[in-house]
Image (spheres, rainbow, N blue to C red):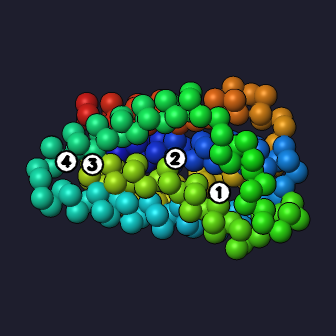
Amino acid sequence: MHWIAIILIGIAANLDNLGIGLAYGIKRVKIPVLSNAVIALISMIVTYAAVTAGSVVINFISPDFANLIGSLLLCAIGIWTLLSSRFSKQGILGNPEVFDEDKNYIISTREAMTLGFVLSANCLAGGIALGANGISAIWTVISIGIFSFITVGAGVHFGTLLTKTFIGKHSTAISGWLLILIAIIEIVS
């Protein structure tokens, strides 16, 4: 059951990255492979720190209670994600070029570092919850990194094509529902 959660958290934490990649693709802003790797690496580092922090919680409370708290936290994050996508359409999606400081339509590795920290915010709370559930830190980190790299790259590459799809239009809502699904799977397993 943990493998399903690890894969789903990798997808859920990075669906916003797909939306960001799409926004950059539409604006014809390129994110080179190295810059995309920097974004993925930062997400991995933040996730590792969060999962490690969450796993420390297990030392102070029973594993069953930690699992319940972690699952409820994931569910709360999913609900918050759904509500925030419903009430706020601002931010990077509305103005993706804000991170292209030199306005050359290419996200440099330095610019990718800033963007990576912003995008890794999704990984922070989810990582703490997964750590509290006792889910493997290393596999969660790898999942986050792989899906970050794939979603940003695919989003930029497909740009205007994917914005017209269901996933492109509703990436934040799908992310929220996936987090709720992960929480339910963890509660019943």
Tags 4 and 3 in contact by the CB under 8 Å rule?
yes
Which of the two marks, 3 or 2, is nearer to us in this view? 2
Which of the two marks, 4 or 1, is nearer to us in this view? 4
State the residue lying farthest toward the bottom: 110
Quarter of the picture containing the C terminus is top left
Q: Which residue is mark 3?
A: 133
Q: Which circle's residue, 3 or 2, is located before the other in the chain?
A: 2
Is 101 situated left or right of 5 in this image?
Answer: right
Which one is in front, 18 or 114? 114
Q: Which circle's residue, 4 or 1, is located before the other in the chain?
A: 4
Quarter of the picture containing the N terminus is top left
Q: Which circle's residue, 3 or 1, is located before the other in the chain?
A: 3
| Vertical position of residue 181 compared to residue 71: above or below | above
Q: Which circle's residue, 4 or 2, is located before the other in the chain?
A: 2
Neighbour tally class for label 1: few under 14, some 14-19, many 20 plus, Cα within 10 Å: many
Q: Residue at x 56, y 29 (%)?
A: 87
How far is mark 3 from mark 1, CA to CA? 25 Å
Q: Which residue is mark 2?
A: 13
Q: Which residue is mark 4?
A: 66
Residue 34 appears anywhere in the view: no
